[in-house]
Image (cartoon, helix red, strand yellow):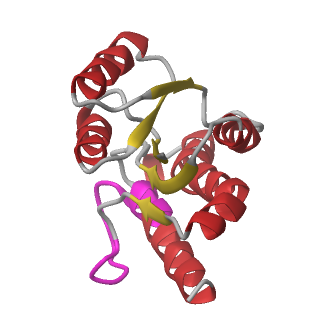
């Protein structure tokens, strides 16, 4: 059996991604932080599709999130085939009004957590010839200035650069 881990999978785009992966034949690992009821509802939909979903509750801002996720995955039978780093905090506001703590939190959530998670799961992904998908909506057309969400854009452009570098390394 092949697993697909999706972060922030209880609602919105994450939940839709889980259902699409379940429909494609993957057993999803549904990560959530606080949305337990929503995560359980997504799991029920996966069960109805004949899949075997797993729930993984953890705050990805925790320093041990990546290690905990790797241990969770390694305890399962089967292989990890897909990791979707979907979680992303969005901050609206100009640079002049963005507090240092907000900047740091955004980088922790949008860049450091996906990098740490991918790094922790890389041996499993290499073994299974798996894939990493990093979600974001900034930077595909090249770095641009952003007036309304510069901190978010910076984190996602950095994640895009990291993703491309990892892909080049693993070619």
Location of the C terminus by quadrant is bottom right
Image check: 4 left or right of 56? Answer: left
Q: Does the magenta stretch include residue 134?
A: no
Residue 62, quarter of picture = top right
Locate residue 120, reporting x and y percent.
72, 54
Residue 9, quarter of picture = top left
Position of residue 161 relative to residue 75, above or below, is: below
Q: Over which residues does the magenta segment extend?
A: 139-155
Residue farthest to the top?
Answer: 37
Image check: 132 left or right of 142? Answer: right
Q: Nearer the viewer, residue 141 or 1?
A: 1
Q: Is residue 140 magenta?
A: yes
Image check: 21 left or right of 154? Answer: left
Q: Main secondary structure of the magenta part?
A: loop
Locate residue 26, reporting x and y percent.
37, 46
Locate residue 12, reporting x and y percent.
24, 34
Please count the marks in the image. 0
Locate residue 42, reporting x and y percent.
29, 24
Residue for point 22% across, 30% down: 49
Position of residue 41 relative to residue 27, above or below, is: above
Position of residue 137 relative to residue 10, above or below, is: below
Image check: 117 left or right of 135? Answer: right
Residue for point 66% across, 39% down: 69
Position of residue 56 relative to residue 101, above or below, is: above
Residue 43, quarter of picture = top left
Residue for point 62% across, 58% down: 118
């Amino acid at each position: 059996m092949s697993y697909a881990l999706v972060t922030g999978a209880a609602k919105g785009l994450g939940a839709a991604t889980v259902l699409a992966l379940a429909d494609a034949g993957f057993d999803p690992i549904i990560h959530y932080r606080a949305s337990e009821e929503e995560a359980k509802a997504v799991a029920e939909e996966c069960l109805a599709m004949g899949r075997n979903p797993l729930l993984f509750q953890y705050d990805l801002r925790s320093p041990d999130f990546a290690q905990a996720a790797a241990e969770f995955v390694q305890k399962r039978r089967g292989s990890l085939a897909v990791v979707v780093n979907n979680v992303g905090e969005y901050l609206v506001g100009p640079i002049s009004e963005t507090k240092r703590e907000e900047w740091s939190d955004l980088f922790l959530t949008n860049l450091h957590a996906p990098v740490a998670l991918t790094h922790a799961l890389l041996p499993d992904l290499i073994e299974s010839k798996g894939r990493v998908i990093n979600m974001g909506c900034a930077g595909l057309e090249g770095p641009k200035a952003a007036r309304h969400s510069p901190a978010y854009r910076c984190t996602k452009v950095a994640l895009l650069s990291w993703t491309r570098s990892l892909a080049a390394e693993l070619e």
